[in-house]
Image (cartoon, rainbow, N blue to C red):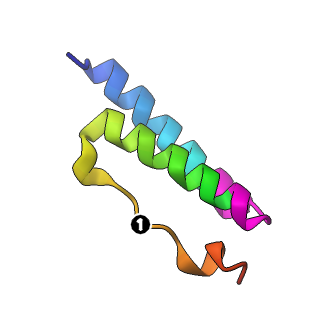
Amino acid sequence: MITDRDRLYFQARAEAELKLAAEAEDPAVCQAHYAMATQYLEAAHGAHMRLPPDPQRLAGGE
């Protein structure tokens, strides 16, 4: 069973990955960070918390 401490850790990691995704210049790197954030959110809250990809970032637009 996941503890509150685990949930907080996974949430913090998800937030860090989202920050890295926002800072990434390479669309593949951005996508990888979004994928990691999604995995951390799923670990913290379950599959219903999946993040949709950011189409502008994935297309290389700023």
Name the amino acid, label 1: Pro
Is 26 located above or below residue 48 in the figure? Answer: below
**Residue 27 lies in magenta, yes or no?**
yes
Q: Quadrant of residue 39?
A: top left
Query: Does residue 42 appear left or right of residue 37 in this picture?
Result: left
Q: Magenta-highlighted stretch: main secondary structure?
A: helix
Is 48 located above or below residue 12 in the figure? Answer: below
Residue occupying the point 41% across, 66% down: 52
Q: Position of residue 34 (x, y in %)?
A: 54, 55
**Residue 50 lies in magenta, yes or no?**
no
Q: Quadrant of residue 60?
A: bottom right
Q: Position of residue 17 (x, y in %)?
A: 58, 46
Which residue is identified by label 1? Answer: 52
Q: Position of residue 33 (x, y in %)?
A: 61, 50
Helix, strand or loop at label 1? It is loop
Q: Quadrant of residue 11?
A: top left
Instruction: Specify the quadrant that holds the N terminus.
Output: top left
User: Dot 1 surroundings within 10 Å: few (below 14), some, or many (20 or more)?
Assistant: few
Query: Does residue 48 appear left or right of residue 53 in this picture?
Result: left
Residue occupying the point 63% across, 73% down: 58
Residue occupying the point 64% across, 57% down: 21
Is 60 located above or below residue 28 in the figure? Answer: below
Query: Does residue 54 appear left or right of residue 33 in this picture?
Result: left
Instruction: Specify the quadrant that holds the C terminus.
Output: bottom right
Query: Does residue 59 appear left or right of residue 40 in this picture?
Result: right
Residue occupying the point 26% across, 46% down: 47
Magenta-drawn segment: 19-29
Task: Pick out the residue farthest to the right.
Answer: 25
